[in-house]
Amino acid sequence: MDDVRSQRGSMAYHAGLSAEDRIADDYERRRYPVAQRRWRGKGGEINLIAQDGDGLVFIEVKQSRDFDQAALHLSPRQMTRLYAIGEEYLGQIPKGSLTEVRFDVALVNGRGEVHVIENAFGHG
């Protein structure tokens, strides 16, 4: 049983990495250079951070069999955590919290299709 769980966990981990790669490629193609992948702060991790001119886009990637299921994986608690991690990241850059930011959610379904929700939740 533990082997099955471990195998499922490994598959989910690799599917998540693949989804992040797909989203990073999508942002790069749309001329948003990816500045950070899997940036880890004290409170957790932000999947991707992209440049938007002088601003930043914090990107949370959610992958599931369909877009609705993927979207359900983002809880209000997680959004609050992402705000805090974003603030921590901003604390390390020259303009700090004066930097214009937005939080996008990028959904990837089981067929590898992408749906990006720009400014999915406001900066708290």
Image (cartoon, rainbow, N blue to C red):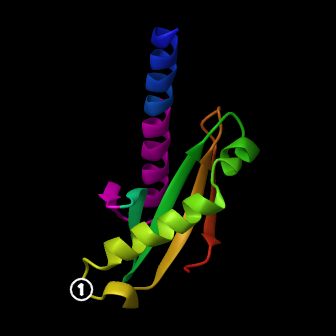
Secondary structure of residue under mark 1: loop
Which image quadrant for residue 40? bottom left
User: Label 1 neighbourhood size at 10 Å, few (<14), some (14-19), many (20+)?
Assistant: few
Q: Identify which residue is drawn at 43% across, 24% down.
A: 10
Image coords of residue 115 (percent x, y): 65, 53
Image coords of residue 49 (percent x, y): 39, 64
Q: Identify which residue is drawn at 49% across, 53% down.
A: 26
Whether residue 104 is visible here, answered yes or no, is yes
Instruction: Please report the bounds of the magenta region as a residue range.
Output: 15-42
- Is residue 50 within the magenta segment? no
The quarter of the picture where the C terminus appears is: bottom right
Q: Identify which residue is drawn at 45% across, 18% down.
A: 6
Q: For this view, does 13 lie left or right of residue 91?
A: right
Q: For this view, does 59 lie left or right of residue 64?
A: left
Q: Which amino acid does label 1 sit on?
A: Pro
Q: Name above or below for residue 83 compared with residue 113.
A: below
- Is residue 31 within the magenta segment? yes
Q: Badge 1 is on which residue? A: 94
